[in-house]
């Protein structure tokens, strides 16, 4: 994609690509040709990471974590999020990043940590079945969606995931709050800044909010959990006429189809037994009754109505 041509010839003879892969000098010649290119569309950082990723020697080849910290990748993230590049480097030789003045004036493409915390708190107070349904919806939407709100959440997650491991540790989350607390655009009021810091360091946050979002009890938050917790549960305040971009009847109908484990067209706690056999009967009954409100089963329309209800149930 960067060079405009495939690495190996896949349009020739069937065994040509295999011969190229096995030929020790093929990649070397390919990279030498790349290094000699004088193409303004291919940056020095791009050429450097290609050389390091395509090294034939596994001992020399760049590791995944190192690749995620490479200037080519970091500058891409910085540009997407509106972060400026600080030309100074850390003790490890890594580029430092800071929010640019243009972002402070024109807005940001990522969620503020105050918004993330508020959405996580709201998620933690939802009935367990609704949180479970949001996890299913997040799985369905995932990273394949081109919705602006999902992209914002995705980019926020990627910038917080410092080691590129695909999940957020508590330390990474707290570090993200500390980094943003230094930015005047998000915390003009020192009292608000301190209250946010106090919240993420409190037992209430760790034992109630974090644990409620950590649906698989891993101790960390994977992207699906983070996406589910950060999806708007109310109409978008910045675009009130558009309503909620994610809470759509068609979405919840699709979720219902997955939760209706026996395909009977209704949802009961028997379906939950099939879906969550590791949970005890009392937990599943409570999970169902919180949303069913006295009904023994929910039709698809009942379920959609309950999920579309943005009030606490």
Image (cartoon, rainbow, N blue to C red):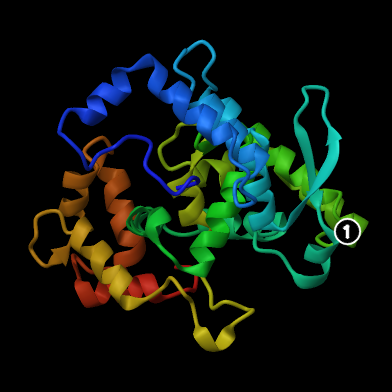
Residue 118 in which image quadrant: bottom right
Number of marks drawn: 1
Residue 292 rendering spot, x and y as whole percentages: 29, 66
Give the residue displayed 37% in from the left and 76% down from the top.
Answer: 248
Residue 91 rendering spot, x and y as whole percentages: 83, 23
Give the answer, above or below, for where 196 lies relative to 312.
above
Q: Quadrant of the C terminus?
A: bottom left
Give the answer, above or below, for where 309 lies relative to 269.
below
Give the residue displayed 16% in from the left and 45% down from the top.
Answer: 274
| Local SS, label 1 | loop
Question: Toward the viewer: 161 or 220?
Answer: 161
| Residue ID for mark 1 | 184
Question: Toward the viewer: 300 or 3?
Answer: 3
Residue 140 in which image quadrant: bottom left
Give the residue displayed 77% in from the left and 35% down from the top.
Answer: 95
Question: Toward the viewer: 150 or 53?
Answer: 53
Residue 20 rendering spot, x and y as whole percentages: 30, 25
The 10 Å Cα crowd at callout 1, few under 14, some 14 to 19, many 20 or more, is few
Give the answer, above or below, for where 102 lies relative to 277.
below
Asked if residue 183 lies left or right of residue 42, the reply is: right
Residue 19 rendering spot, x and y as whole percentages: 25, 22
Residue furthest to the bottom:
241
Give the answer, above or below, for where 105 lies relative to 261.
below
Question: From where the camera sits, is residue 198 visible?
Answer: no
Asked if residue 237 lies left or right of residue 202, the reply is: left
Residue 7 in which image quadrant: top left
Question: From where the camera sits, is residue 47 visible?
Answer: yes
Give the residue displayed 81% in from the left and 65% down from the top.
Answer: 102
Residue furthest to the right:
190
């Amino acid at each position: 994609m960067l060079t405009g041509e495939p690495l190996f010839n896949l349009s020739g003879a069937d065994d040509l690509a295999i011969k190229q892969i096995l030929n020790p000098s093929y990649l070397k010649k390919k990279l030498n040709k790349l290094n000699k290119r004088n193409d303004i569309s291919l940056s020095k950082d791009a050429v450097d990471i290609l050389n390091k990723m395509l090294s034939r020697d596994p001992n020399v080849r760049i590791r995944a974590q190192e690749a995620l910290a490479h200037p080519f990748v970091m500058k891409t993230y910085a540009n997407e999020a509106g972060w400026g590049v600080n030309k100074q480097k850390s003790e490890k030789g890594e580029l430092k990043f800071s929010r640019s003045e243009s972002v402070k004036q024109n807005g940001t493409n990522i969620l503020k940590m105050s918004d993330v915390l508020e959405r996580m708190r709201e998620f933690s107070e939802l009935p367990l079945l609704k949180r479970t349904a949001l996890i299913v919806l997040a799985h369905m939407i995932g990273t394949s969606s081109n919705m602006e709100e999902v992209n914002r959440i995705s980019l926020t997650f990627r910038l917080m995931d410092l080691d590129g491991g695909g999940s957020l540790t508590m330390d990474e989350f707290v570090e993200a709050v500390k980094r943003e607390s230094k930015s005047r655009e998000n915390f003009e009021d020192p009292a608000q800044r301190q209250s946010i810091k106090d919240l993420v360091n409190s037992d209430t946050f760790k034992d109630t909010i974090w644990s409620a979002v950590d649906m698989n009890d891993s101790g960390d938050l994977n992207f699906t959990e983070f996406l589910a917790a950060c999806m708007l549960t109310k109409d978008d305040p910045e675009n009130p006429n558009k309503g909620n971009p994610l809470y759509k009847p068609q979405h919840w109908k699709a979720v219902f189809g997955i939760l209706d484990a026996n395909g009977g067209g209704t949802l009961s706690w028997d379906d939950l037994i099939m879906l969550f056999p590791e949970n005890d009967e009392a937990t599943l009954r409570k999970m169902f009754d919180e949303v069913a409100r006295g009904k023994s089963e929910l039709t698809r329309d009942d379920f959609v109505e309950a999920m579309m209800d943005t009030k606490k149930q």
